[in-house]
């Protein structure tokens, strides 16, 4: 076994120490969030990392709110629905722009790039008026109406599709494959990591969205958890422990998604 030189050993140890410090810096807010969710009111008046006596009733208070389950269902449901619709729309549109020849294609691609320079806040008023005119207030469709397309994600998928070249598509057409079969059997499997990445990005973005759901929902039962958490009353009553417990509960789906799809996201980033 080859022995390490002292200088190499120092570099190796330094790298490990730096990585450990960075990992701790990333993990500390999450660990403290979990710890503080078990704090009593007295613990918040002191500087401490762990509760003196864990207060598990904070979680019972959070889950016992009459609208808590509705908030969770609305958040998860709208996030999944938006992620599925956006992913399907982007796949089909990216295929059309990269593999089909039609008049106005270049104009559409130019407009697609221009959407990257338009802030969503500038469209907020018109989007709200449109959703209200369609009678979609206090509905899931109203909540996800502005999340069904992304220019940046569209360009990402187009780049992945264009990497295959037109020869593969021409060969598939000669073999009698339809466009949908080519998309399903060739494009989607090869671009799987990229597609999974945009699906997860959409899922997390819609789940964490606050401003738009706040505007288009008025009934408590139709609100998402990001809006509802401010209306549970824990902050006003000074029950910070229950508020932190609520945050931990709504973070579980987000952390579970990242843990399950971590490898897929890493593969997509490496391929890019």
Image (cartoon, rainbow, N blue to C red):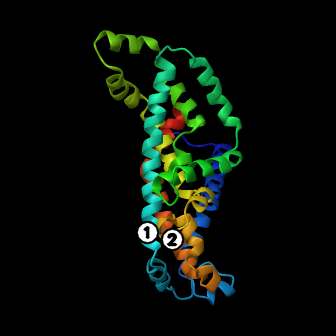
Give the residue displayed 67% in from the left and 45% down from the top.
123
Q: Residue 171: horizontal and vertical position, in percent?
A: 35, 11
180 to 38, vertically: above or below: above
Question: Which of the two residues, 126 or 16, is positioned nearer the viewer here?
Answer: 126
Question: Which of the two residues, 136 or 15, is positioned nearer the viewer here?
Answer: 136
The local crowd at label 1, few if under 14, some if 14 to 19, many if 20 or more residues have their Cα within 10 Å, is: some
The local crowd at label 2, few if under 14, some if 14 to 19, many if 20 or more residues have their Cα within 10 Å, is: some
Give the residue displayed 57% in from the left and 39% down from the top.
150
Q: CB under 8 Å between callouts 1 and 2?
A: yes
Q: Residue furthest left?
A: 176
Q: Residue 231: horizontal and vertical position, in percent?
A: 58, 75
Give the residue displayed 37% in from the left and 26% down from the top.
183
Q: Residue 115: horizontal and vertical position, in percent?
A: 65, 34
Q: Which residue is mark 2?
A: 220
Question: Which of the two residues, 178 or 262, is positioned nearer the viewer here?
Answer: 178
Say the numbered circle drawn on residue 70: 1
Residues at marks 1 and 2, CA–CA distance in whole angstroms: 9 Å
Q: Is residue 238 visible?
A: no
State the SS at label 2: helix
217 to 69, vertically: above or below: above
Give the residue displayed 48% in from the left and 69% down from the top.
249
Nearest to viewer (mark 1 / mark 2): 2
């Amino acid at each position: 076994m080859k022995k390490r030189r002292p200088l190499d050993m120092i570099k190796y140890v330094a790298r490990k120490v730096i990585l450990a410090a960075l990992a701790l810096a990333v993990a500390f807010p999450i660990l403290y969030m979990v710890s503080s969710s078990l704090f009593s009111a007295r613990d918040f008046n002191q500087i401490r990392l762990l509760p003196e006596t864990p207060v598990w009733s904070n979680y019972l208070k959070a889950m016992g709110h009459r609208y808590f389950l509705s908030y969770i269902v609305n958040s998860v449901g709208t996030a999944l629905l938006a992620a599925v619709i956006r992913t399907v729309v982007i796949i089909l549109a990216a295929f059309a722009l990269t593999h089909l020849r039609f008049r106005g294609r270049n104009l559409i691609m130019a407009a697609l790039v221009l959407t990257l320079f338009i802030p969503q806040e500038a469209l907020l008023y018109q989007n709200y008026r449109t959703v209200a005119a369609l009678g979609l207030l206090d509905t899931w469709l109203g909540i996800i109406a502005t999340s069904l397309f992304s220019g940046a994600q569209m360009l990402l998928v187009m780049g992945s599709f264009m990497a295959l070249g037109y020869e593969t598509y021409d060969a598939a057409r000669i073999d009698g494959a339809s466009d949908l079969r080519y998309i399903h059997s060739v494009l989607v499997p090869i671009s799987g990591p990229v597609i999974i990445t945009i699906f997860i990005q959409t899922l997390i973005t819609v789940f964490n969205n606050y401003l738009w759901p706040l505007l288009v929902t008025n009934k408590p039962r139709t609100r998402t958890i990001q809006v509802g958490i401010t209306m549970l009353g824990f902050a006003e009553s000074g029950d910070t422990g229950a508020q932190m417990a609520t945050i931990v509960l709504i973070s579980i789906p987000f952390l579970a998604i990242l843990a399950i799809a971590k490898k897929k996201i890493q593969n997509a980033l490496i391929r890019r």
